[in-house]
Image: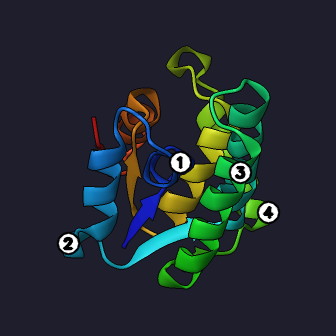
Amino acid sequence: MHYADTSVLMAYLVIEPYSAQAEAALRDPAHSPLAVSAWTETELVSAFGIKCRTKQIDEADMEKGLEKYEALRGFFVHLQVQHEDYRNAATLLRDWRVGLRAGDALHLALAQRHSCVMLSLDKRLVKAGLQAGIAGICLR
C-alpha cells in the first residue's frame, strides 16, 4: 500500500509545478491501494486556506479543489490515527537535525505502522523516512 501525503494531493488538486508527477503517481496502478488519513484531510483543508489567504488561489478555486477531493475520497483507504502514531511521530522528531515538522512526522508514523510506501513531493520528509527505515518515493 502507498500513502499519499498532503503535498501530493495538493499538487493533484491545484495546478502547481509538480502537478503532472502527482497525477501520474495517483493514477499509477503500482501504487494501488492508495491510503490517506484524517490528518491528511485536515492538513489539506489548511493548505487550501493558506493558498487562499496568500492569494495563490481564489475562494472559487479552493471550493473546486475541495469538491474534487470529495469526489475522489472513496478511492482511498482511510487510515485511522491512533495514540501510538503520535508517540511514534514524537520519536521521529527527537532527531531535530532532520528538520521534520510535527505533521510530517505523523504522516511517517502512519505510513510506518501500516507498512506503506510514502509518496511525497517533500524531499526532507522522504529522506527522514528513509533514515528511519520507512520506504518512500519523492515525486520530484
- Is 103 rendered above or below residue 28? above
Q: Which residue is mark 3?
A: 60
Q: Which residue is mark 1?
A: 10
Q: Earlier in the sequence, mark 2 or mark 4?
A: 2
Q: CA distance from mark 2 to mark 3?
A: 33 Å
- CB under 8 Å between callouts 2 and 1? no
Q: CA distance from mark 2 to mark 4?
A: 30 Å
* Residue 6, x across and y down, in percent: 56, 49
* Residue 31, x across and y down, in percent: 28, 69
Q: Which residue is mark 2?
A: 30
> Which amino acid does the dot numbered 3 rest on?
Ala
Of tags 2 and 3, the one toward the viewer is 3
Local crowd size for mark 3, using a 10 Å CA cut-off: few (<14), some (14–19), many (≥20): few
Tell me the element at label 3.
Answer: helix
For the question of whether residue 136 can be seen, the reply is no
**55 sits left or right of 65 in the view:** right
> Which amino acid does the dot numbered 4 rest on?
His
Q: Which residue is mark 4?
A: 83
> Which amino acid does the dot numbered 2 rest on?
Ala
* Residue 96, x across and y down, in percent: 62, 18
Q: Nearer the viewer, residue 65 or 100?
A: 65
> Which amino acid does the dot numbered 1 rest on?
Met
Q: CA distance from mark 4 to mark 1?
A: 26 Å
Q: Nearer the viewer, residue 32 or 105?
A: 32
